[in-house]
Amino acid sequence: MESLKITTVNKRWYDDACGAALGMEFVGERWALLIMRELLLGPRRFGELRAGLPGLSANVLTQRLASLEQSGIVRRERLPSPANVQVYALTAWGRESEPVILALARWALRSPTHDPSLPFSAVSLLLSLRMLLVPERAGKWAATVGVRIGDETFVARLEAGELTVARGAVDAAEAVFSGTPSAFLPVIYGGMPLAVAEAAGMLAIEGNRSVAERFVTLFALPDKVAVE
């Protein structure tokens, strides 16, 4: 931990003992928090991180990963054979940031300036499902749903009014959605009928259709804040 103390002193921006100030020293640089967001569902290769954050240059990504690693938030790992490649992962302490990141995102979504037409990563979509589930709509219903976005597959498991999401094979899912992240938004958050999205080629559905139809009704954006 000595290196962490030295790094903090050398980079100090605020000279403020508040935990909020210290937190901003760790993740306040541009892109740092979004890199952490992309790692919440598991380790990622350097190129995969860039793909999820298309506006981020390789040089800045390298700098931010080094800073997050030095702060004890991110670590480098090597996947076992046959992959045998280096990936970046959140440390146990880094993973504790999930409720903070989701709470910040939900708070910001209440702004009238939120623009849903901007780029939206696969991880953002899956985390939004976890964040914006309405437990009362789910009740005691249990279901396992797969999401396929390009070459990536994710599994969302609903049980006891809570949704968990993770990367994984979708073979055992009751229903599987396929599409781009932006194609899900008008269906899940805009009320577009699933059949309309299918007819337009936005989404494809495999498996139990009744499960798919019910699943997309379980989420809601927070109300917009009134402009004073």
Image (cartoon, rainbow, N blue to C red):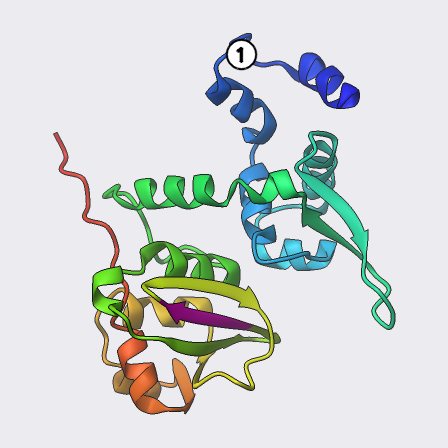
Left or right: 11 in relation to 222: right
18 or 86, which lies in front? 18
Please identify the quarter of the rendering in which residue 69 is found. top right
Q: Position of residue 81 (x, y in %)?
A: 87, 69
| Majority secondary structure in the magenta region | strand
Q: Position of residue 14 (x, y in %)?
A: 53, 12
Tell me what residue is drawn at x 67 percent, y 59 percent: 48
107 or 81, which lies in front? 81
The residue segment tinted magenta is: 154-159
Q: Which residue is mark 1?
A: 14
Tell me what residue is drawn at x 44 percent, y 71 percent: 157
Quadrant housing the N terminus: top right
| Mark 1: secondary structure | loop
Asked if the stretch drawn in magenta spans residue 163, the answer is: no
Q: Position of residue 68 (x, y in %)?
A: 68, 35
One can see residue 163 in this view: yes
Please tell me whether residue 211 is drawn above or below residue 26 in the rendered image: below
Quadrant housing the C terminus: top left
Name the kind of residue labelled 1 in the image.
Tyr
Please tell me whether residue 12 is drawn above or below residue 1 in the rendered image: above
Label 1: how many Cα within 10 Å (few below 14, some 14–19, many 20+): few
